Amino acid sequence: MPETICIVPFGQADPKTAETLCGPLESTFVLKTTVRNQELVPPKAYNAARGQYLSTAFLDALRRKHPGDASKALAVAEVDLYVPRLNFIFGEAEKPGRVAVISLTRLRPEYYGEPADKQLFGERMVKEAIHELGHTFGLWHCLNPVCVMFFSNSLPDTDRKSSEFCARCARKLKQHGTNDLK
């Protein structure tokens, strides 16, 4: 199987929005990146008590529906995600592994009552996609606040960090057998 990344929009996630990730992901990981057909939001993901969706259900759905046709699979969801120990998350991934998910909901300025900003939203989306895919290649969180692998506990953390790996994380990524990074 050739090294590839497939992006899978879930639910109301716009495939055209997902397509904007292809260039940055191909440039960063030097892997062919494609967008697949939309999938339904996993029915068991929704937690009515929280009004949120369990991110692990998206990872499970990716494993089932795209079992090995790409080396990495990234779900893009337009719902608010959580894991049991946190109030919300921007994304989750297997570390190391093959599947990851990001939520677009809290990356949008409109979520916080601010005017839409397509450029800012796009930058946030790229950072979180690269971050989660970095986990699939075996990277953990970085202590460097400008490294893309820095843990975003809040949106200002995401805005402050870069879309690039620090030198230390880039070295680790190359050790895990990825192609030459940008």
Image (cartoon, grey):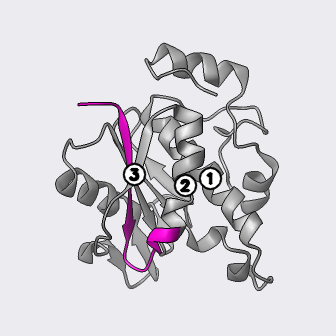
Which amino acid, by three-letter code, is at mark 1? Val
Which amino acid, by three-letter code, is at mark 3? Thr
**Image side of residue 134 versus residue 7, left or right:** right
Residue at position x 19%, y 57% from top?
65
Q: Quadrant of residue 59?
A: bottom left
Q: Secondary structure at mark 1?
A: helix
Residue designated by label 1: 126
Residue at position x 71%, y 82% from top?
110
The percent position of residue 91, horizontal first and vertical second, equals 51, 56
Q: Is there CB contact under 8 Å for labels 3 and 1?
A: no
11 in magenta = yes
Task: Judge whether 143 appears above or below 87 on screen.
Answer: above
Q: CA distance from mark 3 to mark 1?
A: 15 Å
Label 2 crowd bin: few (<14), some (14–19), many (20+), radius 10 Å: many
**Nearer the observer, 49 or 38:** 38
Which amino acid, by three-letter code, is at mark 2? Leu
**Image side of residue 109 versus residue 3, left or right:** right
Which mark identifies residue 34? 3
Q: CA distance from mark 1 to mark 2?
A: 6 Å
Which mark identifies residue 82? none
Count of marks placed on residues: 3
Q: Point out the image quarter for the N terminus.
A: top left
**Image side of residue 45 versus residue 23, left or right:** left
Residue at position x 41%, y 84% from top?
49
Which mark identifies residue 21? 2
Q: CA distance from mark 2 to mark 3?
A: 9 Å
Q: Which residues are magenta?
A: 1-16
Mark 3 vs mark 1: which is more N-terminal?
3
The percent position of residue 120, horizontal first and vertical second, equals 76, 64
Label 3 crowd bin: few (<14), some (14–19), many (20+), radius 10 Å: some
Q: Point out the image quarter for the C terminus.
A: top right
